[in-house]
Amino acid sequence: MRILTGFLLSLILAGGASAARAGYTPDFDSGIDVRLAIEAALEAASSAGGLLPEPQGRPAPETVWVSMEKSDVAALDGALFKRAPVAQNKRIAIYEYETDRLAALADGMQRSFYRAPGFFAHDTLESALEDLKAPPAVPSRAYTLDQAARVRDLAARVKEEPVLAVINAMSAFKNRGSRYATGVDASKWLQKEWAKFASGRSDISVAPFKHAAFPQESVVLTVRGAVEPEKVVVIGGHIDSVAGYGDTPAPGADDNASGAAVTQEAIRVLVESGYRPSKTLKFIGFAAEEAGLRGSADIAAAFKKEGVQVEGMLNLDMVNYKGSEKDIYFVTDNTSADQNAFLGRLIDTYLGYTWGTLKCGYGCSDHASWTKNGYPSSYAFESTFEQHSPFIHKPTDTLGSCGGSAVHAAKFARLAAAYAAELGK
Ligand SMILES: [Zn+2]
Protein backbone atom coordinates (compact mmCIF):
# COMPACT_ATOMS: atom_id res chain seq x y z
CA MET A 1 0.00 0.00 0.00
CA ARG A 2 2.74 2.39 0.96
CA ILE A 3 4.71 1.59 -2.17
CA LEU A 4 1.66 2.20 -4.30
CA THR A 5 0.74 5.50 -2.66
CA GLY A 6 4.36 6.68 -2.71
CA PHE A 7 4.47 5.85 -6.38
CA LEU A 8 1.32 7.85 -7.06
CA LEU A 9 2.63 10.79 -5.09
CA SER A 10 5.96 10.82 -6.88
CA LEU A 11 4.11 10.83 -10.18
CA ILE A 12 1.99 13.77 -9.12
CA LEU A 13 4.80 15.74 -7.53
CA ALA A 14 7.56 15.02 -9.99
CA GLY A 15 5.77 15.50 -13.20
CA GLY A 16 2.73 17.52 -12.29
CA ALA A 17 0.03 17.14 -14.84
CA SER A 18 1.32 14.83 -17.50
CA ALA A 19 3.01 12.31 -15.25
CA ALA A 20 0.02 12.22 -12.93
CA ARG A 21 -2.25 11.52 -15.85
CA ALA A 22 0.03 8.73 -17.00
CA GLY A 23 -0.24 7.09 -13.58
CA TYR A 24 -4.01 6.82 -13.46
CA THR A 25 -7.02 7.79 -15.46
CA PRO A 26 -9.14 10.36 -13.66
CA ASP A 27 -12.84 10.10 -14.19
CA PHE A 28 -13.71 13.74 -14.71
CA ASP A 29 -17.43 13.15 -14.37
CA SER A 30 -17.68 11.29 -11.10
CA GLY A 31 -14.30 12.31 -9.74
CA ILE A 32 -13.89 8.97 -7.99
CA ASP A 33 -10.38 8.28 -9.24
CA VAL A 34 -9.25 11.83 -8.66
CA ARG A 35 -10.39 11.67 -5.06
CA LEU A 36 -8.57 8.40 -4.49
CA ALA A 37 -5.42 9.84 -5.98
CA ILE A 38 -5.56 12.85 -3.70
CA GLU A 39 -6.12 10.69 -0.63
CA ALA A 40 -3.24 8.48 -1.65
CA ALA A 41 -1.00 11.49 -2.19
CA LEU A 42 -1.87 12.92 1.21
CA GLU A 43 -1.23 9.63 2.95
CA ALA A 44 2.11 9.29 1.25
CA ALA A 45 3.01 12.90 2.01
CA SER A 46 2.31 12.44 5.71
CA SER A 47 4.45 9.31 5.88
CA ALA A 48 7.40 10.76 3.95
CA GLY A 49 9.74 12.65 6.29
CA GLY A 50 11.03 15.03 3.65
CA LEU A 51 7.57 16.31 2.95
CA LEU A 52 6.51 17.03 6.50
CA PRO A 53 5.98 20.75 6.95
CA GLU A 54 8.58 22.45 9.07
CA PRO A 55 8.56 26.08 10.08
CA GLN A 56 11.27 27.98 8.24
CA GLY A 57 13.02 31.28 8.74
CA ARG A 58 11.56 31.65 12.18
CA PRO A 59 14.13 32.93 14.67
CA ALA A 60 12.86 34.79 17.74
CA PRO A 61 9.15 35.39 18.31
CA GLU A 62 8.27 38.17 15.99
CA THR A 63 5.77 40.95 16.39
CA VAL A 64 3.34 42.04 13.74
CA TRP A 65 0.65 44.68 13.75
CA VAL A 66 -2.81 43.52 12.84
CA SER A 67 -5.59 45.77 11.55
CA MET A 68 -9.09 44.46 12.14
CA GLU A 69 -12.65 45.63 12.11
CA LYS A 70 -13.62 46.53 15.67
CA SER A 71 -16.96 44.77 15.45
CA ASP A 72 -15.12 41.52 14.62
CA VAL A 73 -12.79 41.92 17.58
CA ALA A 74 -15.71 42.53 19.91
CA ALA A 75 -17.32 39.26 18.83
CA LEU A 76 -14.15 37.14 18.95
CA ASP A 77 -13.14 34.79 21.73
CA GLY A 78 -11.43 36.87 24.44
CA ALA A 79 -8.46 34.50 24.46
CA LEU A 80 -7.50 35.85 21.07
CA PHE A 81 -7.77 39.47 22.09
CA LYS A 82 -6.88 40.28 25.67
CA ARG A 83 -5.14 43.48 24.73
CA ALA A 84 -5.80 47.11 24.00
CA PRO A 85 -5.48 48.56 20.53
CA VAL A 86 -2.43 50.71 19.86
CA ALA A 87 -4.46 52.93 17.51
CA GLN A 88 -7.95 53.04 16.10
CA ASN A 89 -10.55 54.97 14.18
CA LYS A 90 -14.31 54.47 14.19
CA ARG A 91 -14.22 51.19 12.33
CA ILE A 92 -10.68 49.75 12.38
CA ALA A 93 -8.29 49.04 15.24
CA ILE A 94 -4.58 48.18 15.22
CA TYR A 95 -3.17 45.59 17.62
CA GLU A 96 0.33 44.36 18.31
CA TYR A 97 0.25 40.61 17.77
CA GLU A 98 2.64 37.63 17.81
CA THR A 99 3.46 36.13 14.43
CA ASP A 100 3.27 32.66 15.96
CA ARG A 101 -0.37 33.25 16.86
CA LEU A 102 -1.59 34.56 13.52
CA ALA A 103 -2.75 31.10 12.42
CA ALA A 104 -4.79 30.79 15.62
CA LEU A 105 -6.31 34.21 14.99
CA ALA A 106 -7.24 33.28 11.41
CA ASP A 107 -8.70 30.03 12.71
CA GLY A 108 -10.72 31.97 15.29
CA MET A 109 -12.05 34.24 12.55
CA GLN A 110 -13.00 31.23 10.45
CA ARG A 111 -14.81 29.57 13.35
CA SER A 112 -16.57 32.73 14.47
CA PHE A 113 -17.53 34.29 11.17
CA TYR A 114 -16.97 31.52 8.61
CA ARG A 115 -14.48 33.74 6.81
CA ALA A 116 -10.76 34.37 7.03
CA PRO A 117 -8.36 35.91 7.49
CA GLY A 118 -10.44 39.08 7.93
CA PHE A 119 -7.38 41.07 8.96
CA PHE A 120 -4.20 42.55 7.55
CA ALA A 121 -0.91 41.60 9.23
CA HIS A 122 1.83 44.24 8.91
CA ASP A 123 5.57 44.09 9.48
CA THR A 124 5.62 47.63 10.86
CA LEU A 125 3.30 49.82 12.90
CA GLU A 126 3.77 52.54 10.30
CA SER A 127 2.33 50.29 7.62
CA ALA A 128 -0.59 49.25 9.86
CA LEU A 129 -1.48 52.87 10.62
CA GLU A 130 -2.09 53.38 6.88
CA ASP A 131 -5.14 51.14 7.27
CA LEU A 132 -6.79 53.79 9.45
CA LYS A 133 -6.86 56.19 6.50
CA ALA A 134 -9.57 56.13 3.86
CA PRO A 135 -8.27 54.38 0.73
CA PRO A 136 -7.36 56.69 -2.14
CA ALA A 137 -10.26 57.25 -4.51
CA VAL A 138 -10.20 55.02 -7.57
CA PRO A 139 -10.28 57.20 -10.69
CA SER A 140 -13.32 56.39 -12.81
CA ARG A 141 -12.63 54.95 -16.23
CA ALA A 142 -14.60 53.82 -19.26
CA TYR A 143 -14.97 50.09 -19.84
CA THR A 144 -15.64 49.00 -23.41
CA LEU A 145 -16.46 45.64 -24.94
CA ASP A 146 -15.26 45.24 -28.51
CA GLN A 147 -13.07 42.12 -28.56
CA ALA A 148 -15.79 39.57 -29.31
CA ALA A 149 -13.78 37.33 -31.65
CA ARG A 150 -10.77 37.30 -29.31
CA VAL A 151 -12.83 36.56 -26.20
CA ARG A 152 -14.84 33.79 -27.85
CA ASP A 153 -11.65 32.18 -29.12
CA LEU A 154 -10.03 32.28 -25.67
CA ALA A 155 -13.15 31.00 -23.91
CA ALA A 156 -13.41 28.08 -26.33
CA ARG A 157 -9.81 27.06 -25.53
CA VAL A 158 -10.40 26.68 -21.78
CA LYS A 159 -10.38 23.04 -20.70
CA GLU A 160 -11.06 21.35 -17.39
CA GLU A 161 -8.19 18.90 -17.57
CA PRO A 162 -5.33 21.40 -17.10
CA VAL A 163 -7.23 22.99 -14.21
CA LEU A 164 -7.64 19.59 -12.55
CA ALA A 165 -3.96 18.85 -13.03
CA VAL A 166 -2.88 21.99 -11.16
CA ILE A 167 -5.38 21.42 -8.35
CA ASN A 168 -4.15 17.84 -8.02
CA ALA A 169 -0.51 18.81 -7.95
CA MET A 170 -0.91 21.67 -5.47
CA SER A 171 -3.17 19.62 -3.19
CA ALA A 172 -0.46 16.99 -2.92
CA PHE A 173 1.79 19.32 -0.90
CA LYS A 174 0.90 18.44 2.65
CA ASN A 175 0.45 22.03 3.79
CA ARG A 176 1.18 25.14 1.69
CA GLY A 177 1.46 27.42 4.71
CA SER A 178 3.71 30.41 4.06
CA ARG A 179 6.19 29.45 6.81
CA TYR A 180 6.41 25.75 5.94
CA ALA A 181 8.96 23.99 3.76
CA THR A 182 6.11 22.44 1.80
CA GLY A 183 4.64 25.91 1.26
CA VAL A 184 7.99 27.05 -0.15
CA ASP A 185 8.15 23.94 -2.35
CA ALA A 186 4.65 24.55 -3.71
CA SER A 187 5.63 28.07 -4.77
CA LYS A 188 8.79 26.75 -6.47
CA TRP A 189 6.72 24.13 -8.27
CA LEU A 190 4.32 26.76 -9.61
CA GLN A 191 7.23 28.96 -10.73
CA LYS A 192 8.56 26.04 -12.79
CA GLU A 193 5.16 25.32 -14.31
CA TRP A 194 4.62 28.95 -15.28
CA ALA A 195 8.16 29.28 -16.67
CA LYS A 196 7.12 26.81 -19.38
CA PHE A 197 4.79 29.46 -20.82
CA ALA A 198 7.71 31.86 -21.30
CA SER A 199 9.65 29.65 -23.70
CA GLY A 200 9.78 31.18 -27.16
CA ARG A 201 8.15 34.40 -25.97
CA SER A 202 10.58 37.23 -25.21
CA ASP A 203 7.63 39.29 -23.94
CA ILE A 204 6.80 36.77 -21.20
CA SER A 205 8.81 36.40 -17.99
CA VAL A 206 8.31 34.57 -14.71
CA ALA A 207 9.87 35.72 -11.44
CA PRO A 208 9.35 35.14 -7.73
CA PHE A 209 8.36 38.07 -5.54
CA LYS A 210 10.31 37.59 -2.32
CA HIS A 211 8.86 38.65 1.02
CA ALA A 212 10.95 39.79 3.97
CA ALA A 213 8.75 38.37 6.70
CA PHE A 214 8.20 34.75 5.54
CA PRO A 215 9.95 32.28 3.22
CA GLN A 216 7.17 31.47 0.75
CA GLU A 217 7.52 33.47 -2.46
CA SER A 218 4.71 34.90 -4.54
CA VAL A 219 4.85 33.91 -8.21
CA VAL A 220 4.54 36.52 -10.97
CA LEU A 221 4.14 35.86 -14.71
CA THR A 222 4.36 39.03 -16.79
CA VAL A 223 3.21 39.44 -20.39
CA ARG A 224 4.74 42.75 -21.41
CA GLY A 225 2.31 45.05 -23.19
CA ALA A 226 3.04 45.62 -26.86
CA VAL A 227 1.66 49.17 -27.01
CA GLU A 228 1.18 50.57 -23.50
CA PRO A 229 3.47 48.44 -21.31
CA GLU A 230 3.31 50.95 -18.45
CA LYS A 231 -0.37 50.08 -17.90
CA VAL A 232 -0.85 46.86 -15.93
CA VAL A 233 -3.75 44.42 -15.50
CA VAL A 234 -3.43 42.03 -12.53
CA ILE A 235 -5.12 38.63 -12.26
CA GLY A 236 -4.43 36.17 -9.48
CA GLY A 237 -5.22 34.24 -6.35
CA HIS A 238 -3.35 32.99 -3.31
CA ILE A 239 -1.24 29.85 -3.34
CA ASP A 240 -0.92 29.15 0.39
CA SER A 241 -3.26 26.90 2.37
CA VAL A 242 -4.22 26.39 5.99
CA ALA A 243 -6.19 23.91 8.08
CA GLY A 244 -6.72 25.04 11.63
CA TYR A 245 -3.20 25.46 12.96
CA GLY A 246 -0.26 23.19 13.60
CA ASP A 247 0.98 20.76 11.00
CA THR A 248 -2.42 19.49 9.91
CA PRO A 249 -2.67 18.38 6.28
CA ALA A 250 -4.05 21.34 4.36
CA PRO A 251 -4.66 20.27 0.75
CA GLY A 252 -6.54 23.52 0.08
CA ALA A 253 -7.95 22.21 -3.20
CA ASP A 254 -10.76 24.75 -3.32
CA ASP A 255 -9.03 27.31 -1.07
CA ASN A 256 -7.12 28.09 -3.11
CA ALA A 257 -5.46 25.66 -5.50
CA SER A 258 -8.57 26.29 -7.60
CA GLY A 259 -7.86 30.01 -7.99
CA ALA A 260 -4.19 29.38 -8.83
CA ALA A 261 -5.23 26.71 -11.34
CA VAL A 262 -7.72 29.05 -13.02
CA THR A 263 -5.07 31.79 -13.16
CA GLN A 264 -2.76 29.33 -14.89
CA GLU A 265 -5.48 28.24 -17.30
CA ALA A 266 -6.03 31.86 -18.34
CA ILE A 267 -2.28 32.12 -19.00
CA ARG A 268 -2.34 28.87 -20.96
CA VAL A 269 -5.13 29.89 -23.34
CA LEU A 270 -3.65 33.36 -23.87
CA VAL A 271 -0.29 31.85 -24.81
CA GLU A 272 -1.84 29.07 -26.92
CA SER A 273 -3.84 31.63 -28.90
CA GLY A 274 -0.77 33.79 -29.56
CA TYR A 275 -2.47 36.84 -28.05
CA ARG A 276 -0.17 39.88 -27.62
CA PRO A 277 -1.92 42.35 -25.34
CA SER A 278 -1.48 46.12 -25.73
CA LYS A 279 -1.16 46.55 -21.97
CA THR A 280 0.96 44.51 -19.60
CA LEU A 281 -0.70 41.52 -17.95
CA LYS A 282 0.55 40.28 -14.59
CA PHE A 283 -0.65 36.90 -13.35
CA ILE A 284 0.17 36.41 -9.68
CA GLY A 285 0.05 33.55 -7.21
CA PHE A 286 0.01 35.36 -3.86
CA ALA A 287 1.92 33.98 -0.87
CA ALA A 288 0.64 34.18 2.71
CA GLU A 289 -2.97 35.23 2.18
CA GLU A 290 -4.13 33.11 5.09
CA ALA A 291 -1.57 34.79 7.36
CA GLY A 292 -3.14 38.24 6.94
CA LEU A 293 -3.04 39.04 3.21
CA ARG A 294 0.70 39.56 3.59
CA GLY A 295 1.82 38.58 0.07
CA SER A 296 -0.65 40.70 -1.86
CA ALA A 297 -0.20 43.63 0.56
CA ASP A 298 3.57 43.60 -0.06
CA ILE A 299 3.09 43.52 -3.84
CA ALA A 300 0.31 46.11 -4.07
CA ALA A 301 2.29 48.46 -1.79
CA ALA A 302 5.42 47.99 -3.91
CA PHE A 303 3.45 48.76 -7.07
CA LYS A 304 2.01 51.86 -5.46
CA LYS A 305 5.44 53.02 -4.31
CA GLU A 306 6.89 52.51 -7.79
CA GLY A 307 3.98 54.35 -9.38
CA VAL A 308 2.77 51.33 -11.37
CA GLN A 309 -0.46 52.15 -13.22
CA VAL A 310 -2.72 49.23 -12.31
CA GLU A 311 -5.73 49.35 -14.62
CA GLY A 312 -7.56 46.71 -12.65
CA MET A 313 -7.16 43.65 -10.44
CA LEU A 314 -9.22 40.44 -10.50
CA ASN A 315 -8.96 38.17 -7.45
CA LEU A 316 -9.79 34.46 -7.77
CA ASP A 317 -10.09 32.76 -4.38
CA MET A 318 -12.31 29.63 -4.06
CA VAL A 319 -13.81 28.98 -7.47
CA ASN A 320 -14.55 25.27 -7.72
CA TYR A 321 -17.37 24.46 -5.25
CA LYS A 322 -20.78 25.10 -6.76
CA GLY A 323 -22.81 25.65 -3.62
CA SER A 324 -25.39 28.05 -5.04
CA GLU A 325 -27.80 28.33 -7.89
CA LYS A 326 -25.88 30.91 -9.88
CA ASP A 327 -22.51 30.40 -11.51
CA ILE A 328 -20.35 33.34 -10.43
CA TYR A 329 -20.70 35.77 -7.51
CA PHE A 330 -18.98 39.14 -7.14
CA VAL A 331 -18.00 40.63 -3.80
CA THR A 332 -19.46 44.13 -3.52
CA ASP A 333 -17.65 45.44 -0.43
CA ASN A 334 -14.08 46.75 -0.67
CA THR A 335 -14.16 46.33 -4.45
CA SER A 336 -14.77 48.61 -7.46
CA ALA A 337 -18.47 48.87 -8.36
CA ASP A 338 -17.57 50.02 -11.88
CA GLN A 339 -15.25 47.12 -12.50
CA ASN A 340 -17.73 44.66 -10.99
CA ALA A 341 -20.35 45.93 -13.46
CA PHE A 342 -17.83 45.48 -16.28
CA LEU A 343 -17.25 41.87 -15.23
CA GLY A 344 -21.00 41.30 -15.19
CA ARG A 345 -21.23 42.67 -18.72
CA LEU A 346 -18.42 40.34 -19.83
CA ILE A 347 -20.45 37.40 -18.56
CA ASP A 348 -23.73 38.59 -20.09
CA THR A 349 -22.16 39.43 -23.44
CA TYR A 350 -19.80 36.53 -23.98
CA LEU A 351 -20.22 33.70 -21.52
CA GLY A 352 -23.92 33.36 -20.79
CA TYR A 353 -23.48 32.34 -17.14
CA THR A 354 -25.69 33.49 -14.32
CA TRP A 355 -24.15 35.73 -11.67
CA GLY A 356 -24.95 37.33 -8.36
CA THR A 357 -23.32 39.33 -5.58
CA LEU A 358 -22.25 38.92 -1.97
CA LYS A 359 -20.40 40.73 0.81
CA CYS A 360 -17.44 39.15 2.57
CA GLY A 361 -16.36 41.73 5.16
CA TYR A 362 -13.09 43.42 6.05
CA GLY A 363 -9.87 41.97 4.66
CA CYS A 364 -11.43 38.72 3.47
CA SER A 365 -9.04 38.15 0.55
CA ASP A 366 -6.30 39.61 -1.64
CA HIS A 367 -8.48 42.09 -3.56
CA ALA A 368 -8.52 44.19 -0.37
CA SER A 369 -4.77 44.84 -0.68
CA TRP A 370 -5.31 46.46 -4.07
CA THR A 371 -8.38 48.44 -3.02
CA LYS A 372 -6.55 50.02 -0.11
CA ASN A 373 -3.80 51.19 -2.47
CA GLY A 374 -6.32 52.95 -4.71
CA TYR A 375 -6.50 50.34 -7.47
CA PRO A 376 -9.82 49.10 -8.91
CA SER A 377 -10.23 45.50 -7.75
CA SER A 378 -12.88 42.79 -7.97
CA TYR A 379 -13.33 39.40 -6.37
CA ALA A 380 -15.07 36.57 -8.24
CA PHE A 381 -16.34 33.85 -5.89
CA GLU A 382 -17.85 30.36 -6.16
CA SER A 383 -21.19 30.86 -4.36
CA THR A 384 -23.14 33.03 -1.97
CA PHE A 385 -21.38 33.71 1.33
CA GLU A 386 -23.55 31.21 3.20
CA GLN A 387 -23.14 28.42 0.67
CA HIS A 388 -19.39 28.33 0.02
CA SER A 389 -17.46 25.11 0.50
CA PRO A 390 -17.89 23.82 4.06
CA PHE A 391 -14.59 21.95 3.76
CA ILE A 392 -12.19 24.90 3.55
CA HIS A 393 -9.45 25.20 6.17
CA LYS A 394 -9.82 21.49 6.88
CA PRO A 395 -7.94 18.37 5.75
CA THR A 396 -11.07 17.52 3.77
CA ASP A 397 -10.68 20.45 1.32
CA THR A 398 -9.86 18.04 -1.50
CA LEU A 399 -10.79 17.94 -5.15
CA GLY A 400 -13.21 15.15 -4.26
CA SER A 401 -15.05 17.58 -1.98
CA CYS A 402 -15.65 19.74 -5.06
CA GLY A 403 -17.14 16.75 -6.87
CA GLY A 404 -13.83 15.76 -8.44
CA SER A 405 -14.52 18.05 -11.37
CA ALA A 406 -13.33 21.44 -12.59
CA VAL A 407 -16.53 22.35 -14.44
CA HIS A 408 -17.23 25.19 -12.04
CA ALA A 409 -13.64 26.50 -11.99
CA ALA A 410 -13.47 26.52 -15.80
CA LYS A 411 -16.14 29.25 -15.87
CA PHE A 412 -13.81 31.49 -13.88
CA ALA A 413 -10.92 30.74 -16.26
CA ARG A 414 -13.11 31.93 -19.15
CA LEU A 415 -14.02 35.06 -17.20
CA ALA A 416 -10.35 35.75 -16.40
CA ALA A 417 -9.39 35.35 -20.07
CA ALA A 418 -12.24 37.67 -21.16
CA TYR A 419 -11.14 40.22 -18.54
CA ALA A 420 -7.52 40.05 -19.76
CA ALA A 421 -8.58 40.50 -23.37
CA GLU A 422 -10.98 43.42 -22.84
CA LEU A 423 -8.97 45.31 -20.21
CA GLY A 424 -5.55 44.43 -21.65
CA LYS A 425 -6.41 45.52 -25.19
ZN1 LIG B 1 -8.68 31.63 0.23
Image: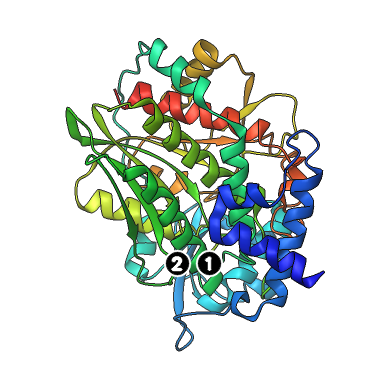
Q: How many marks?
A: 2
Quadrant in which the N terminus is drawn: bottom right
Q: Which of 342 and 275 lies nearest the eye of the viewer?
A: 275
- Front residue of 185/75: it is 185
Residue 415, percent across and down? Answer: 50, 26
> Disc 1 to disc 2, how far (Cα)?
6 Å
Kindly state the secondary structure of the residue where label 2 is placed: loop
Q: Is residue 168 above or below residue 111?
A: above
Dot 2, how many residues are within 10 Å of its Cα: few (below 14), some (14-19), or many (20+)?
many
The secondary structure type at the circle numbered 1 is helix
Q: Note whether residue 333 is visible.
A: yes
Q: Amino acid at mark 1?
A: Gly
Circles 1 and 2, Cβ within 8 Å, touching? The answer is: yes
Mark 2 and ligand 1: say if the CB distance to the nearest ligand atom is below 8 Å: no
- Residue 279 on image: x %, y %: 25, 30
The label shown at residue 16 is none
Residue pictured at 62% horizontal, 28% vertical: 328
Residue 76 in view in this figure: no
Q: Which color mode does the image show?
A: rainbow
Mark 1 Cβ inside 8 Å of ligand 1: no
Which residue is depicted at the point 53% across and 49% down? 365
Foreground of the two, 338 or 399: 399
Q: Name the outermost residue toward the bottom.
A: 60
Out of 66 and 386, give the one closest to the viewer: 386
Q: Amino acid type of disc 2?
A: Gln
> Which residue is under mark 2?
216
Q: Which mark is residue 183?
A: 1
Q: Which residue is pictured at 38% across the width and 28% down the height?
A: 420
Location of the C terminus (image quadrant): top left
Residue 290 sits in quarter: bottom right
